Image: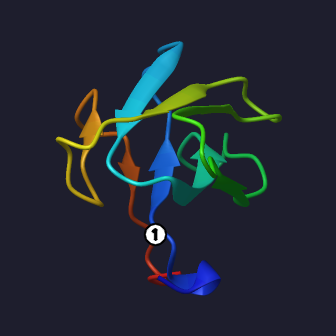
Amino acid sequence: MARNDCVKFKNDQGVPEIRIGVKAFKCAGASAPQDHPHIHLDMGAADTILCPYCATVFRYDPRLGPREADPPGSSFIDDLGK
């Protein structure tokens, strides 16, 4: 998946950890207008990563699909498809 095509995740619920089905993605923080810069994060060989802007911990869960997250509703869909 190219960097510009990365799945985005948000934390509107304010949970400390979100489980996701990918290791490379973008974090938006929250829905606009409370979002932070949509930054690319890559876990590499690790199973977790901390967003430096919103302090959300993202944990890789291989049982989830690329656009799935737990808690549900954490996938970020923007109108531009970017």
Does residue 81 appear to the left or right of 49 in the view shown?
left
Give coordinates of residue 51: x percent, y percent: 72, 35
At a point 55% along the width and 60% down the height, the residue shown is 24
Tally the numbered discs: 1
Q: Which type of secondary structure does the marked residue at label 1 adopt?
A: loop
Q: Residues within 10 Å of mark 1 (few under 14, many from 20)?
A: few
Does residue 32 appear to the left or right of 60 in the view shown?
right
At a point 55% along the width and 86% down the height, the residue shown is 2
- Foreground residue among 65 and 8: 65
Residue 35 vertical position relative to residue 71 in the rendered view, above or below: below
Residue 2 vertical position relative to residue 10 in the rendered view, above or below: below
At a point 28% along the width and 27% down the height, the residue shown is 71
Q: Give amino acid for label 1.
A: Asp
- For label 1, the residue is 78
Give coordinates of residue 40: x percent, y percent: 70, 61
Asked whether the viewer can see residue 14, the reply is no
Does residue 79 appear to the left or right of 72 in the view shown?
right
Give coordinates of residue 81: x percent, y percent: 44, 82
Q: Quadrant of residue 63?
A: top left
Asked whether the viewer can see residue 47, the reply is yes
At a point 59% along the width and 37% down the height, the residue shown is 46
Q: Quadrant of residue 20?
A: top left
Residue 49 vertical position relative to residue 81 in the rendered view, above or below: above
Does residue 56 appear to the left or right of 78 in the view shown?
right
> Which residue extends farthest front?
45
> Which residue extends farthest top?
16
Q: How is the image coloured?
A: rainbow
Give coordinates of residue 34: x percent, y percent: 67, 40
